[in-house]
Structure formats: C-alpha cells, structure tokens
Image (tube, rainbow, N blue to C red):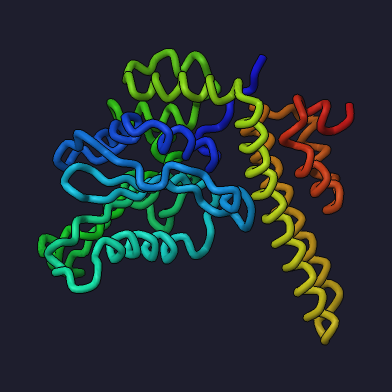
Amino acid sequence: MVTLLDPKNDYVFKRLFAGDPELTLALINDLRPDLPRVVWVEILNPTIEAAELTGKGIVLDVRARCADGHQYNIEMQVQHARDWGARSLFYLARLLSQQLDAGEEYQAVASAIGIHLLDFDLFISSEAQRQQALWRFEMRDATQHDVLLGSELQLTVIELKKADRLGQLQGAPGDWVRFFRHWQEDTIMAEVTHEPVKKAMGSIRQLSADEEAQRLAESLERGRINWNLSIGSARREGVEQGLEQGLERGLEQGLEQGLEQGERRVLQRLLVRRFGELPVWVLKELEHASAETLETWADDILTAGSPEELFGR
C-alpha cells in the first residue's frame, strides 16, 4: 500500500497548488470569502528550482496574480521559527514593492495578500487568543480600529491545529482544515463533500504513486530534520564553549539534557505524523535514547516502513 504524501510538506504543497491554478483559485476564494470572488489566477512561480530543495528550511510558497492585478502569497509553515512574523511581512511587502517599475505612480499598486497556513499554535498568550484560529491583519489605527490606512497589505493566518481542535471553521474552510490535518484518515475524508478538496485528495494520491515525488518530498523533510538537529548540535557546542570559560558542570549537564529532550520531542512528533499513535515501547525507546541515536533515527525515519523497522525490532 502506498504511503500518502503529507500535503503540508513544502514540496508537496507547491506541487499541488502551483501545478493546478484552479485549485489555487478555489483555496483563495474559500479562505478569503470576504474579498470579491476571484475568477482567474496566474501562477507567478510555477516551477521548483533544485536550489529550493536544499538549505535551511526554505519555504516553497505559491505566488499568484488574479484578473484585477491583486497578488497572493500562499504558504504552508510546519515549524514555528522565531522570525516567522518578520519574515512573512518582509516577503509580503516585497511582493507589493516589486509591482512598480521606475516612474510609475503608486496608484498602480494592487494589493499583496498573504494566506499563511500554520501547523502550530502561534497566538497562545491569553485565553482569547487560544480560542481563535483565524486571523486577518491589515494596516489599521491602533486605537480607532475602523480607520484603515489602506488594503494594499493583507495577511490571513490560519492555525490549522487550533482550527481543527476548536472546530471553528465550517463549510469549505473547515474542509480544507480537515484535508491538511486528516488526509490519511479515510473515515474523516469520506465526509468531505467540497469538490476542490476532493480534487486535492485525488492529486495527493497521484503524487504519492510517483516515486520521484516521494523521493523529493522525503529529501526536503530529511533536510529539515537534519537542519533542526544541526542547530541543536551548534547550540550544544556554544553552551560547552561558554561553560569552559567558567560555568559549573552541573549547568552544562542541565542544558545538554534540555536540548536532547527538545530533539526527542521533535522526533516523537514526526513519528506520530508518519505512523499514527505510537505504542508504549516506542515512547520508552525515545526516552532512553542518546543524542547520537536520536540523530540516526531522524536520518532513517523517512525511509522506514514501520516503527519496528526504524528501531530494528
């Protein structure tokens, strides 16, 4: 049986939407129903360059332009990087600024609209934030919220895990949430009636049967895992160097254990995403593994067909 590719994988996400303008059109209309309905889109970056599949977690976004000139930046984010907000605003602003050639009037600028899907909880500092999964940001006055500076910069953020957990999004938006969170669960996906989501599910099955697509998706995921682990190693080295200059050994051990525990949680999350609910023996293996063993398992997780194969049972 073919293992279905994860639509949240950067490579798979771009193959799905950059390769099918009609699917991108549906996603825009479903997630921004407050805007005038889009009837046509042009994908501005339809290809995937080899350099985009390497490096430190490059996001393969989808950029599209609709008939009235408005431009869309659609991204999937599975990791909560500390600079996520600044990076998102920077690229959205660049999408806006690149519309004008020298000498053109600013009135010629069309809106740059971001639709960013996050596979993590971003806003959690208050109970009100924890109870909201859909966010829309614009340039408004801080005190008089009805005073809008302009609609040229807009950013819609959907926290997928929170939206799924709270069940806030109904209809087509809710079907997209179910697709990105439960694509492997036949009983849940069988209840989805929205045709674009059903089409996306069919495309996932086709992509998953393509050995080259499987290889590239796994290569990108493996690169992400190795990058995360290398960051952890670099941090450990930095801690060790600082400790050599005067910190006590007990602090070093505590920080080392904390970093290993973080790597352990990342690997456990990936195991759940790949194999579903984990048996108790897997959790025990993770609990007692060394940092070197965790790195070995991270290298092998994308090619292993089962937890038993990964752990050599």
Name the one closer to the observer, 163 or 103: 103
Q: Residue 19: x, y in percent? A: 43, 34
Name the one closer to the observer, 101 or 260: 101
Task: Identify whether 287 is placed above or below 97.
Answer: above
At 25% from the left and 67% from the top, the residue drawn is: 101
Q: Residue 309: x, y in percent? A: 83, 27
Q: Quadrant of the N terminus?
A: top right
At 81% from the left and 37% from the top, the residue drawn is: 284
Residue 24 sits in quarter? top left
Left or right of 59 on screen, residue 115: left
Q: Residue 224: x, y in percent? A: 65, 50
Residue lying furthest bottom = 245
Q: Quadrant of the C terminus?
A: top right
At 24% from the left and 65% from the top, the residue drawn is: 100
Asked if residue 222 shows in the view, the reply is: yes
Left or right of 5 on screen, residue 101: left
Q: Residue 308: x, y in percent? A: 82, 26
